[in-house]
Image (cartoon, rainbow, N blue to C red):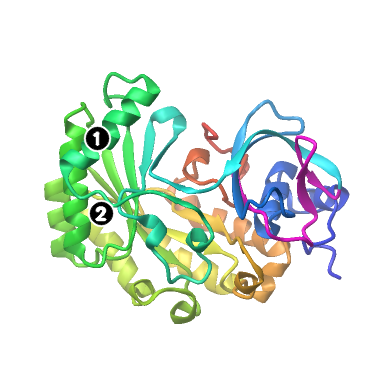
Amino acid sequence: MNDTTTTGMDSAQLQALAERHRVPYLDVALIAANSEGARPLQGYPRARMQLRPQGSAETWQIILPFDNAQSPFEVADGALRLAGEPVADVVALENDDVVLTYLRAGGRSITLNTHSRSKCTGCLFCPNVIEDAADETLATADQLAEVLEWLMADNGWPDLSHTEVITVCSGCFHYPGMAIDHMAALRMAADRYGFTGRLHLLSSVLRDRADLARLRETCGPFHLTLTMECFERRSLLLKDTKASLTLERAGEILEDCRELDIVGDFTYVAGLDSLETAVKGIGHLAPRVGTFPRIQVFQAHNDYMRRARHRAAEDLTYYLDLRAELEKVFAPTGLVPKSWENYRPLWYSEFAGAAVPGPRV
């Protein structure tokens, strides 16, 4: 067995790998945990956890699948353990269901699943098929306002003036107009409570410049994240509405976003493509984004999903090599990842030798 595959690995091997690649041990350990998942726990298919790594005073958010009986990682005796040795204390743990709303960055960022994200299926690697659903489809400004009122009351907020961004994770908007109307209704609802920040949508349905212009006009300050996910095997791994978005077209959309004063970026799942394709594809899009993209470590939630992983990504060095290459790709842009925007990144504590900015949750 290659000594850099995650199955069978222990902390000493991870430490040696971290030193060889000049990457913090924390980052290597959490990348490995994301890649491998953890042994079954309490019937959870997947769980949200807050962790305090050994030797760190900070608490980090991580979401892991709990399906892999062969994983070297497990949660036991209040800790995430690697081959029996503690990697991090578990501060909190709960089932990762698809909830209607949750907070990031201490409430500066609100995420809403207001268009039945749980019913969105078709991409081979998506966890929606195993997560419990607690979201809804809300269509009108009044319905959305009720959710925001509940959120404010639950957190003791007088208004939303402190909130910088409200994100909607796409729930299969089948047409551009559906997405625009939903986001316009959200803007109307949020405006009632003093929100002046940016709306954010993760979707691949908005592609035409005219639709983007209408989006900007009706929804105000906006951030569009294209759900690219991968560059190879797109028709096999993605549902048709995503697979039809080409790399070249995505680049054009991001250029349109920049000209229309829309912040643009993309999602990408590291571990599905060859290393060469991943670097080349992200390198094509990097000069066109307005913020650091959501680059996430591939997670398999069952044996069937594990087959989607690129053979090269079975070796942990794949992720560390990709991490190093992408630091070079993004160096000219000045963009860096933020911890609270991505809970399964390639960069946890350090990016290109500098600390990754928090908050972590």
Q: Is residue 314 left or right of residue 180?
A: right
Residue 92 lies left or right of residue 165; in this view the side is right
Name the residue at 37% across, 71% down: 242
Circle 1: element type: helix
Q: Decide which of tag 1 and tag 2 comes sooner along the chain.
A: 1
Q: Where is residue 327 drawn, in percent x and y?
A: 56, 53
Q: What residue lies at 59% left-to-right and 40% top-to-bottom?
A: 94
Describe the element under mark 2 as helix, strand or loop. helix
Q: Residue at x 53, y 73 (%)?
A: 277
Q: Which mark is residue 164?
A: none
Q: Residues within 10 Å of mark 1 (few under 14, many from 20)?
A: few
Identity of the residue drawn at 29% across and 36% down: 147
In this rendering, the label closer to the viewer, 1 or 2: 1
Q: Position of residue 214 (x, y in %)?
A: 12, 55
Q: Which residues are magenta?
A: 62-83
- Cα distance between the residues tagged 1 and 2: 33 Å
Circle 1 residue: 146
Query: In the depicted view, which residue is nearer to us: 248 or 73?
Result: 73
Q: Which mark is residue 258?
A: 2
Instruction: Give yes or no for residue 7 being in the magenta stretch.
Output: no
Q: Quadrant of the N terminus?
A: bottom right
Give the amino acid at mark 1. Glu
Q: Quadrant of residue 92 in the image?
A: top right
